[in-house]
Image (cartoon, rainbow, N blue to C red):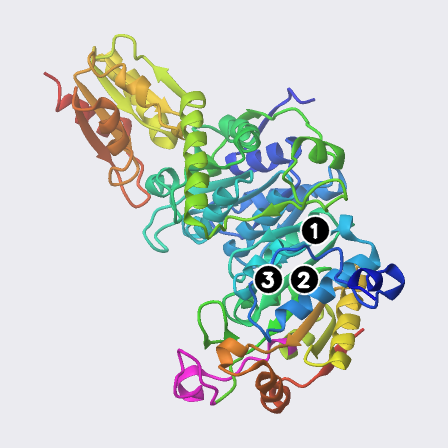
Amino acid sequence: MSEEIKLMKGNEAIAHAAIRCGCDGYFGYPITPQSEIMETLMDEQPWKTTGMVVLQAESEVAAINMVYGGAGCGKKVMTSSSSPGISLKQEGISYIAGAEIPCLIVNVMRGGPGLGTIQASQADYFQAVKGGGHGDYKVIVLAPASVQEMADHTALGFDLAFKYLNPVMILADGIIGQMMEKVILPPFTPRFTDEEIKAKLPWATYGKPASRKPNVITSLELESIVMEQRNLKFQAKYRKIEENEVRFEEFECEDAEYMLVAFGTSARVCQRAVEIAREQGIKLGLIRPITLWPFPTKEIASYASKVKCFFSIEMNAGQMIEDVRLAVNGKAEVEYFGRLGGVVPSPDEVIEVVKAKLV
Amino acid sequence: MTIQDIIKPENLVYTKSKILNDTPMHYCPGCSHGVVHKLIAEIIEEMGIQEDVIGVAPVGCAVFAYKYFDIDFQEAAHGRAPAVATAIKRLMPNKYVFSYQGDGDMAAIGTAETIHACNRGENIVMIYINNGIYGMTGGQMAPTTLEGMKTATCPYGRNTELNGYPLNITDLLSRLEGVRYVTRQSVHNSASVRKAKHAIKKGLENSMEGKGTSVIEVVSTCSSGWKMTPDQSNKWMVENMFPAYPMGDLKDL
């Protein structure tokens, strides 16, 4: 059964995958283009099967704080939203990072700033990758480029969240959320039992037995010298994540003289651009970061002496290009091309940008 | 007779609840928080629910509430305690879950979370300390600050033209279908302390019956914020706060 191939939207794949991953609770507030996540969950009624709680909150702010409460109990909890709603969640994400509790946040991005547009965009790269909320913290950011990855990253996201006790964000866009593709959903994993939570998550607030000290979920510490130690511990964890969790995909990179770097929908456009360019004899390759943080810095750097020019292709005004430049570190040219406000670049547009740089 | 002769179990007339630990409290002399903490601890001990209760602390003077109780606690962002408590209770329905909130948390920044948790009829207990002022940040105006009452951000007295009116949120909440029990109490003398204890206990007991939210407002003093002695504060509260926030049950289904 679990190997059955289904046809569904990316948003629906996240909902089905969450149920199958043993998710304990989803808390969300409707916003285009990701409302199918909660709609699918409400339709599936997982509280009747796995016992998963699904609750429509009064706001994105309430939803992320419900996630905080659930995560603090050692439960596998998630929320989803789109760009304006994710802005509202940033306070809560900072608290979750500061309290070191696990959760999954899905951002199906739309164009901004402000209310912007409901069309797909990648303009929340900085917000997702560089912090978003206040304080020195990092969120693990996964960038799916297919419906299959929407499902896979839901399972991976929960695994990483619990491995590092850190918020994980799936940074998709309206196209990945709305388009239909075939998908193999993850196998069913039962929800954590109370005994498993007690045994594996010694910090969780499930009610204090006489045998242990109280568990407290908090990000507060007024002694600055202690707060510094806590911050240093976070930073050590982030370095470990950078060492162990970089994920990326290479396409026609081996002999590439020109290299595209793109994620999500842009990466799919770029893959087509590489195919067309290769037909025309242009040695073009593509690096697709799957984790945007941690960023595949070393992997991009390893091509810096072989490649004449890198192109950061983004559906924004040029955000990831800063990380590409840091990776390349001046050893090659780095160009940007992108479309804004919900417009998707075409493969032909990408090839024109590359051709303008051909030596 | 020496002191050692007197300290014997049979002579014990009062002792601190085991649920309160020995951490020195940061509350000011005359503050109501300490008394309400004591009541919560006594009730948890009497009900024997230490293993089955999770508290949610606010931002405000009670931000460190979790330091004083020997139970599991979560510290919520400002105003978000009802949302945090909602998820804890929904995910662990066999546990007792209470939020502990001040007037700013409950009736200003957290108004949406407060109203919607109550409107959904979450089976939680909201313990609401209303002293009409922001104590933690140094005595600024609260949503419940009385008309004409002076604070750091209304130094000439709350002017309703500029600041609007004192928000009687408990009254509002009592009208919501999801709410089962709403009461307004105080802890300024021993009779009121006994009544407040009864109310909090009733709220906790209610929360296991699946019939909706219980809200216990405790009209409280803030000697430091009000710039009065503890005794003056109690008198001022009775004379000024009680007419605006009258004692008693607003709803009991």
* Residue A109: x %, y % from top left: 41, 42
Q: Residue B120 carries which label?
A: 2
Classified by dominant secondary structure, the portion drawn in magenta counts as loop
State which quadrant residue B217 falls in. Answer: bottom right
Range shown magenta: B148-170
* Residue A225: x %, y % from top left: 42, 45
Front disc: 3 or 2? 3
What's the CA distance linking mark 3 and mark 2?
34 Å
Answer above or below: position of A99 versus A321. below
Q: Which chain carries label 3?
A: B
Q: Mark 2 lies on which chain?
A: B
Q: Which mark is residue B71?
A: 1
Q: Which mark is residue B232?
A: none
**Element under disc 2:** loop
- Crowd rating for badge 3 (residues with CA inside 10 Å; few <14, some 14–19, many 20+): few
Front one among B79 and A219: A219
- Crowd rating for badge 2 (residues with CA inside 10 Å; few <14, some 14–19, many 20+): some
**Residue type, mark 1 in image:** Ile
Same chain letter for marks 1 and 3: yes
Q: Residue B25 carries which label?
A: 3
**Element under disc 1:** loop
Please tell me whether residue A162 belongs to the stretch shown in magenta. Answer: no
Considering only order in the chain, which callout, 3 or 1, is on the residue closer to the N terminus? Answer: 3
Front one among B63 and A287: B63
**Residue type, mark 3 in image:** Met
Answer with left or right where residue A25 lies relative to residue A231. Answer: right
Farthest-out residue, top = A255
Screen quadrant of the N terminus of chain A: top right
Answer with left or right where residue A287 lies relative to residue B243. Answer: left
